[in-house]
Amino acid sequence: MEQFEGKAIYNGVAIGKIKYYAKSEQQVKRYKVEDVDAELERYEKAKEEAGRQIEELRQKALAEVGEDNAMIFEVHAIMLEDEDYNESVYNIIRSDKVNAEYAVAATGDNFSLMFAEMEDEYFKARAVDVKDVSERLLRVLSGESSQRTTGVEPVILVAEDLAPSETVQMDKSKILAFITREGSANSHTAILARTMNIPALIGVDIRQQWDGCVGIVDGREGLFIVEPDAATLEKYKGEQKKERENLELLQSLKGLPDETKDGRHIELYANIGSVGDVAGVLANDAAGIGLFRSEFLYLEKDNYPSEEEQFQVYKTVARNMAGKKVVIRTLDIGADKQAAYFHLDHEENPAMGYRAIRICLDRRDIFKVQLRALYRASAFGNIAVMFPMIISEKEVQEIKKICGEVRGELDSSGIQYGQVELGVMIETPAAVMISDRLAKEVDFFSIGTNDLTQYTLAIDRQNPKLDSIYDAHHPAILQMIQMVIDNGHKEGCWVGICGELGADITLTEQFIRMGIDELSVSPSFILPVRKAIRESVYQR
Ligand code: PEP
Ligand code: MG
């Protein structure tokens, strides 16, 4: 028995035979062709067939994993038609009088190298896509089937890396888990694995000779066990059985209302950090999005995201949620979330420093770009906007003034926008204490218990040494939540929790009794929290 560590990107336990997935290793031969025109035509035909396959994959992805994940195949389709790419293939065939396979392989290598060397993370990531498209063309040219099947028996798939198109093409019923050496937690493949509810680990030091061995994937602990001994196998079989029973039970909750036994309805929403997370929101049947941490959009860039870029992201999320509420939090940068291009000074106490709304009210140019994008996107769905780290009424009044200016600018340019609810995050003790006054200014409150706990207990949430005393169940926190709910309700605001505490099912019934209107949790917690809501009683 051997045990390996990796980074879990989706939890759960899988036991089964290991299949080492080798990329189709095309040894592309270079040979001279007599008839260059015929070779060019062969390439054109292969391109048509590849285009057809990509469209088929896009449709499959649309049906199985949602619009956002299907977008990757639109990128592939665009690459296939890319003028520079095609010019390069034509030129090699024409000038060297060589076969199309060689021209495609050479072009694919050059372009993927070029992308890989780019600074911009987005373009860097496209290197994989160019390779993927080129390999598809090569398979078509060589007459190989487009489907990469894994056999009849479900397996734990072990691979160096997996391209999104490879992942989505696989028959889900034949995959027990994914293990890869490469890949990042935010890659499309990782997102797809999460969306498919398949345990997955990345960063594992994989070996080809495992092919055919028995493996255990422990996606909770980030472990991969090869050729387990009898006791380990028994232990994991027991855990898997429990897990299956729980999951089955939870799946049966899909489509059921988020209501207590005595009929109190709770809005059960999901937290996301990117467009890619929406598929999980839908798959877990959330009624909306209660926190979109928009700063992740800024963190993955090396310059300020433009209004247009942001608009496209917010619009896609709003559209995919098809009329369900999407609460987007404005930029909460600073402290642990740093982007070099903001040029923020080093601070002694960054969590209490120049961050979030403080930066936005100071650098209005940045703030207004985001607000314009948000208002424009609101024409395409049900968008609400909330502001982080609020400590005073003055801040909220100032924010509302800026929002008014943005709406005025959009009006004068004839740009449409929808009805946008405005809310504040309650994550500082100051905001709690003046929540009666803040409630007069806004439509809703969302309690950020992660920061509220940090500021109330004076415990740095980043400090692992203090983990054991970082107690979100502290009576001070629970009393503050009650105070915020009561003050919000007096002025007609709805009140939710979007910090991690919202997913703590040991408190669900207590929150409901306190009068909470909304809970926003990670997508995978939606069904467990639904279960807890449905087992609760609002009034004794
Ligand atoms: C919070 O503070 O509870 C919260 C939801 O925001 P973040 O975790 O992003 O600071
Ligand atoms: Mg916070």
Image (cartoon, helix red, strand yellow):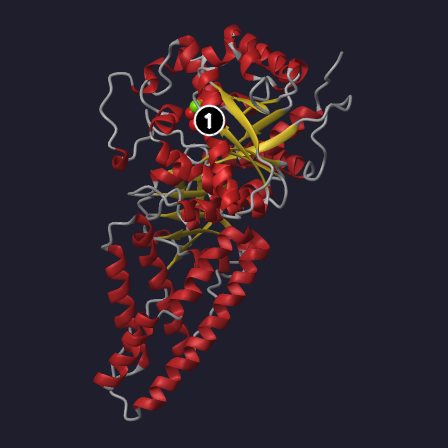
Position of residue 174 relative to residue 400, above or below, is below
- The amino acid beneath tag 1 is Ile
Query: Ligand 1 quadrant?
Result: top left
Question: Dividing the picture into quarters, in which one does residue 478 lie?
Answer: top right
80 to the left or right of 493: left
- Determine if residue 494 is in view: yes
Which class describes the residues within 10 Å of circle 1: few (<14), some (14-19), or many (20+)?
some
* Residue carrying label 1: 399
Q: Is residue 88 above or below residue 289?
A: below
Residue 341 lies left or right of residue 24; in this view the side is left
Q: Residue 212: x percent and y percent?
A: 42, 54
Left or right? Give the position of 468 relative to 29. right
Q: Residue at x 27, y 64 (%)?
A: 111
Nearest the eye: 216 or 405: 405
- At 52% across and 61% down in the image, what residue appears? 58
In the image shown, does 152 or 369 lie closer to the viewer?
A: 369
